[in-house]
């Protein structure tokens, strides 16, 4: 099968969060299974250019019809993890992808609309006719609309469209003008069964367009697929997803084990496996050295992730202080685009600067994240909602026990040692229900108790996590069966 992934991120060259890992990991697995996969991405000034291999010197020149003008773009071919990638660079005065960061510009909707039109124009110019085009999140949702309308008479009209929602919170709400900018007649889309936003119908909703106009819609865990169909977590799209339920399902993300495996990880000082699990503690020592933590008999609790309201920042802050009080060590690696949150954590870092039981690293640091997964005992994920969550699955691979709130993909992957109905052999962590201080304190206390008083049980939990297969193998098969279903017209 020939699959074209189109996305705004791909690890490791342009990564903000899990979306990047998924685009990379799923593509790698499809390639390993013998399929032809290519990826179209923006050519950001801030991407990690050194990780693109074999970049070709003769880019394709494109003039993209957008905003009533012809926007000059070039498409640069390179390889990432064995996948052929096409990076679209814009040369117009707007310098759409030269903003020093991936997201957060005031004109993000316009930037990704240009990217969407350019991606289609590139496929047409280069004669690319994939069997399936797979778009991700609001940034590339417009492609499905473009192919159903503006380009419906092109040779891409038979290509099937798969659309994946990675986070329903961010939908891309735009004015009519943006559709016009992208060459779409806004009046066609103003109805509620088209693209009109359900909460503010004067706006057009790009994610809704992705749901309505694609052949199949997925999200990143079965539990989140259910949750997004409720008014509590559907963010206004619950009725749209329910109306499209026959083409909507949740598939748990995988972890790319070529990148995330303690046996072969180049970013950690000592490799280890289930059979040499004690070597994990050499990484714990290195982590302490690197972060100037004192070497004492205590578990290390880690948080790795975006410091965003979704991730439960006030619970993270509370658990940090609570853990220090209760004799745990705490490591935080996270960054926030939100100034208020960022400032708050910088103050906290300053306040705790002399405490050698904790370290707050308020940056994005891929290499350090590997050492934290390897060197910590527990990872804390107190999310308000979590579409899938990769950090708990990565952590488990490294024998680091997750303590998570029971929501979304966390529910589908973490089973409480004491409370789960699963067989003992599948229980791999600690969970809590309520989004409250008391609930997280109770889960932390239970985990600390088992670590202190029942070390053999704690080790069993670690081993269960390490042995569970969270690779892409099964999830990529699910995607392949959806692709086949679309191609056979049976969806
Ligand atoms: P989300 O997509 O909501 O950000 P996920 O758990 O799905 O959350 O994926 C997060 C990914 O980003 C993981 O690979 C995690 O290791 C990585 N990550 C998040 N924050 C940082 C950071 N500050 N430094 C390094 N890696 C990070």
Image (cartoon, rainbow, N blue to C red):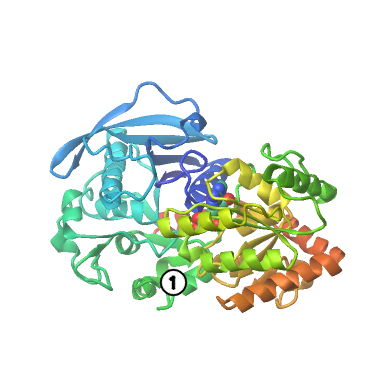
Neighbor class of circle 1 (other Cα within 10 Å; few <14, some 14-19, many 20+) is many
Residue 129 coordinates in the image, percent (x, y): 35, 41
Farthest residue toward the top? Answer: 57
Q: Is residue 485 visible?
A: yes
Which of the 4 image quarters holds residue 30? top right
Residue 373, percent across and down? 67, 51
* Left or right: residue 344 compared with residue 157: right
x 69%, y 63%: residue: 324
Q: Is 469 on the left or on the right of 318, as rendered?
A: right
- Give the residue at x 23% y 39%: 94
Residue 481 higher or lower than 7, as above or below: below
Residue designated by label 1: 228
Q: Quadrant of the C terminus?
A: bottom left
Residue 200 placement (x, y as % from top left)? 24, 71
Q: Is residue 166 above or below residue 123?
A: below
| Front one among 277 and 39 | 277
User: Is residue 257 among the parts visible in the rendering?
Assistant: no
Q: Is residue 293 above or below residue 215?
A: above
Report the front residue among 3 and 253. Answer: 253
Check disc 1 and report its element: helix, strand or loop: loop
Q: Residue 302 occupies which quadrant of the picture? A: bottom right
Any atom of ligand 1 within 8 Å of the CB at mark 1? Answer: no
Horizontal and vertical percent position of residue 248: 43, 67
């Amino acid at each position: 099968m020939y699959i074209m992934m189109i996305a705004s991120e791909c690890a490791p060259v342009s990564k903000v969060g899990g979306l990047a890992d998924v685009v990379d990991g799923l593509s790698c697995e499809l390639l390993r299974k013998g399929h032809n996969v290519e990826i179209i991405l923006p050519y950001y000034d801030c991407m990690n250019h050194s990780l693109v291999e074999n970049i070709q010197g003769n880019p394709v020149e494109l003039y993209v019809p957008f905003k009533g003008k012809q926007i000059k773009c070039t498409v640069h071919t390179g390889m990432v993890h064995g996948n052929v990638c096409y990076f679209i660079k814009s040369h117009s005065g707007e310098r759409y992808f030269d903003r020093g960061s991936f997201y957060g510009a005031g004109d993000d909707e316009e930037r990704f609309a240009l990217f969407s039109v350019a991606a289609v124009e590139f496929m047409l110019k280069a004669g690319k006719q994939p069997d399936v085009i797979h778009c991700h999140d609001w940034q590339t949702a417009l492609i499905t609309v473009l192919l159903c309308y503006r380009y419906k008479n092109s040779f891409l009209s038979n290509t099937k469209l798969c659309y994946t929602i990675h986070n329903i919170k961010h939908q891309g709400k735009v004015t009519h003008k943006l559709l016009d900018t992208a060459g779409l007649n806004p009046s066609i889309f103003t109805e509620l069964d088209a693209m009109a936003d359900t909460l503010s119908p004067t706006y057009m909703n790009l994610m809704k367009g992705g749901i309505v106009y694609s052949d199949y819609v997925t999200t990143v865990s079965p539990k989140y697929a259910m949750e997004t169909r409720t008014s509590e977590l559907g963010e206004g799209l619950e009725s749209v997803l329910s109306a499209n339920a026959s083409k909507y399902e949740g598939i748990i993300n995988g972890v790319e084990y070529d990148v995330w495996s303690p046996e072969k990880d180049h970013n950690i000082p000592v490799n280890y496996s289930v059979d040499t699990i004690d070597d994990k503690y050499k990484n714990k020592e290195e982590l302490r050295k690197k972060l100037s933590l004192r070497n004492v008999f205590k578990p290390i609790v880690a948080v790795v992730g975006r410091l965003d309201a979704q991730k439960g920042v006030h619970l993270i802050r509370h658990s940090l202080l609570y853990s220090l009080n209760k004799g745990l060590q705490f490591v935080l690696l996270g960054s926030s685009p939100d100034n208020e949150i960022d400032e708050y954590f910088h103050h906290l870092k300053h306040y705790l600067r002399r405490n050698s039981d904790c370290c707050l690293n308020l940056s994005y640091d891929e290499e350090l994240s590997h050492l934290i997964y390897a060197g910590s005992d527990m990872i804390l994920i107190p999310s308000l909602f979590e579409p899938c969550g990769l950090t708990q699955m990565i952590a488990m691979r490294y024998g680091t026990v997750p303590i998570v709130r029971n929501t979304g993909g966390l529910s589908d992957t973490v089973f409480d040692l004491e409370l789960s109905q699963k067989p003992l052999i599948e229980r791999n962590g600690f969970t809590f229900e309520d989004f409250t201080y008391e609930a997280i304190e109770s889960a932390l206390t239970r985990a600390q108790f088992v670590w202190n008083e029942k070390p053999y049980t704690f080790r069993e939990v670690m081993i269960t996590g390490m042995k569970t297969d969270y690779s892409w193998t099964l999830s990529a098969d699910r995607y392949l069966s959806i692709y086949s279903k679309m191609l056979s017209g049976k969806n």
